[in-house]
Amino acid sequence: MAALTSTQSGNFSSASTWGGTSPADGDTFTIAAGHKVTINSDLRPTNGYGDIAIYGNLHFATNGKFRLNGRITSHGRATGTDYNTPAQFAEGNASTGSLLSSSGNNMLLEVRGSNADQHGIWVENVRYASMKLEADEYLTTTTLSSAPAIGDDYITVSQSAGFAEGDWISVYKENEDNRVLGDEGLWVHDVDSANNRIYVRQFVHPTAIIQSVNGTKIVVDDASVFRKGYKLICGTQSVRKVAEVSSINYASNELTMTSSYSSSQVGKTLHQTGLEKIHASGKKVQKLSTTIRTEIATADSTNQIVVGSSNDISVGDEIVIDVNNDVDRGWDYESKYTVTAKSGNTLTLNDDVRQLHKVGSLVNVLNRHFTIKGVDTSADTRPFLYIEYWTDLNNAHTRHIGLKNIRFTQWGNNTNSTYYRGIMIAGYNSEYRENENTNGRYQYQSHIQGCVVDTPNIANQSYNGISLRHPYGFTCRNNTLYYAGQHQIWSWSSQHNIKIYNNYITRSAYSGYDNGALYEPHCEISYNYITRCDDYGMLIHHNRGDNTPIRHNYILHMDSRPFYCYYWTGDTAMERMYLDGFKNQPYIGEGNGTIQFLDCYMDNKYYKSIDTGIQGQHDSNRYFAYGSSSGKTQFNRTSGKLQHFVSYEHNFRYDAKMESFGGAFNYNRSKMGSHREAYTVQGNTYTPYIQQVYIPAAATVRISMSMSLSKNSHTRPYLFAMKANGYRYAGGRYSGSYTGNTDYVSSSAASSVFSGFAEQVQYTSAADGDWEEKQLTVSPQAKGYFLLVGIRTDDNSRDEKHLFELPDIMVDTATQIGKSDSVGKSISNRAGFTKTKKRIGGTRL
């Protein structure tokens, strides 16, 4: 084995590149500054070449195939050069930096190495140590030929061939100012090939079916999901129709539209259309997925599928079919196949289709024009890619990092460091800024784009996917991750101005997308499609202060929870999230304020629907989900807003609101009037409604509330009132000692301002199928305090739906300071339970 150093630019296989010595199996290499060494042929000796130190440029070109039994390291600029001079690699200039790069197609890098060897790709944390591994587009990609306006229902592209109804597309610009939230994900509704127009649907949107038409007036099955001003699209080709909602009669489900409909549109599904972002001409439009067009109704019955568009799928390609059905409720489903034959849009696979698939199930191609992989499938082959951790913000922008259209497979899980587990991009790298050109630092947007990570040699391990540790201004878009371990996209530590766009993630052993923290105002997490995770679909910590846009994300078929958040600023809002198929409800950690969902869908098909009463696939009688909430949300431990989330315009309906307090929740729609429905999802002593109010010193509080209960067998709920501050656990019974404390301390017996107390009254059989009012009186206290008022339920109410009216809370002492942080009735000033009657109009006789 020889140690070779380049003497000039040239092909890797050429002896002249290495001073007259031809490379041999096991040799090591140094590429000198200013030299470009190109791999453009099949260079795969039996064992593989050794370590490669890059001070110039190692470049993979079309047809380049290479076997490595060592580490490729991008070292940056040579010692002694002026680091203040702009110095991205330039061939022939020994003062410029290092670069690992690629371009073209039919490229392969195989890496050999055991866990102890620590082989793979490494980029140093020094100036001008860069990596731009890119390949030609494998997926159908075109560009915008003109700039659409916000609200447009179609985009005009340079070439519309290869796109079909149901395809998932991404609209983006690669080198866009990182302060711009520019990417958008859409569904293809229809293609007008004559005019190169792609009609689109919004990524997450409501739908309704047309029942009848009468000119501009159309009746749909559910108008409550639409709003005045929505632009709706239905039908294709000759029956395609786009119009705007000008008014809605929600009572009759009638929409008045801006133009007339015909009988040919009856029975068609209305989708919401209209672009939401500004897009300049020239932006790329890429098809990320096509879809199944004929249902697979029986598993293991056929090895053929029909897809919407197959132009970028070839014989020999590997594909993943999303396991989208209502029968398989786990996560660990093998859904990767090899295409063995193709006829039009019919694909023949190497095996019978193993699961059921609905029409519309996504089909993703795993192949790319550059594959980086372990040399074999041995569990001891564990290569990795590591961009070394760096937090020098000013200088880190000289390090340009890009991965584009690369497939990583049989990759990762080196146990010598968390950094060596898969694709780890650590620390700060360059971001693109239009008006900043200092030393070229801001002229490249670091990204991982259009890549695939699938099937590491050891399954279900941590961090084998895409990992971003503490980045600054990084974009992660259009990637596909399948069976890539426990954290498929892992945003570790604080994430500054990151973009997570249009990624497909499935078959995760823990979480689909896991984010440690969100900082800075230019973050966005949108247009992602996450399915089949063992624990969490999307897990996000520390969303602090900038209310990051988290919207238009599908999270489907979770073996546990679709969503988890912790340490979020209160009243943070997410919009247009689509959550369906989960065993446990979204987990809102105790360290959050109230979390808000707006215009989202989460009518969970695994459990009984609160809207339709349709029985669930996982549990036929329990509503919504199981709780698994913290014990701190029990009525006698909570502050009133622990694990609290509110879903406004729930399930897209204009008049629906769901409010969860961890172990139980309530639901209201306008057609229910002032009534709310109360549901229990977990255990004893949880509350479907709770309100915290301020009570002044020396005030008597009177509370009344009516409930109508299910007639089924269950422990009837309680109306309760208890002191929120001071020692309240167990209703104050242990505030002094343990001896003799067998019941709650009443408000009249509270011995000091420190003591807690609890008053409660249980509803009786009079409330079964009817309405019963219960009342509580809270005795005056020596100083002002906060009072919790609400309902508590029992474990055996999980299958029940009760009705309640918001409580009337009355004090006999004028309250100078109003306080109620739930949307409930105003606190009234009254000396008794009798309500004052007001005479309106008329003549007194």
Image (cartoon, rainbow, N blue to C red):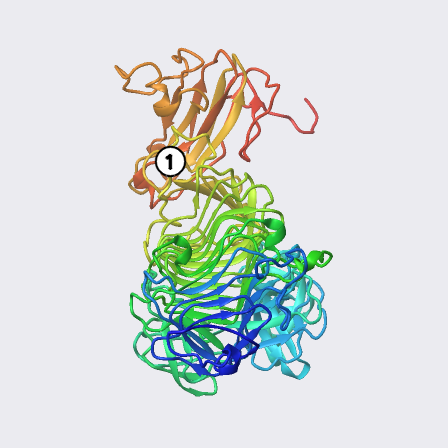
**Image height check: is 837 above or below 423?**
above
Is 697 or 171 nearer to us in this picture?
A: 171
Q: Residue 132: x and y, percent?
A: 56, 68
Residue 551 appears in the picture as rendered: yes
Q: Residue 89: x and y, percent?
A: 61, 67
Q: Residues within 10 Å of mark 1 (few under 14, many from 20)?
A: many
Which quadrant holds residue 150? bottom right
Going 49% across and 38% down the picture, which residue do you hit?
592
* Left or right: 349 as drawn, with respect to 13: left
Residue at the far left in the pictured view:
739
Which quadrant holds residue 216? bottom right
Q: Give the residue type that dot 1 points to.
A: Tyr
**Image height check: is 844 above or below 321?**
above
**Image height check: is 650 above or below 755?**
below
Q: Residue 204: x and y, percent?
A: 54, 60
Is 277 or 763 nearer to us in this picture?
A: 277
Is 498 or 726 nearer to us in this picture?
A: 498
Going 72% across and 69% down the picture, which residue do you hit?
147
Name the secondary structure under disc 1.
Answer: loop
Count of numbered marks: 1
* Left or right: 741 as drawn, with respect to 172: left
Q: Residue 641: x and y, percent?
A: 48, 34
Residue 359 appears in the picture as rendered: no
Which residue in the structure is indicated by mark 1?
686
* Left or right: 136 as drawn, with respect to 424: right
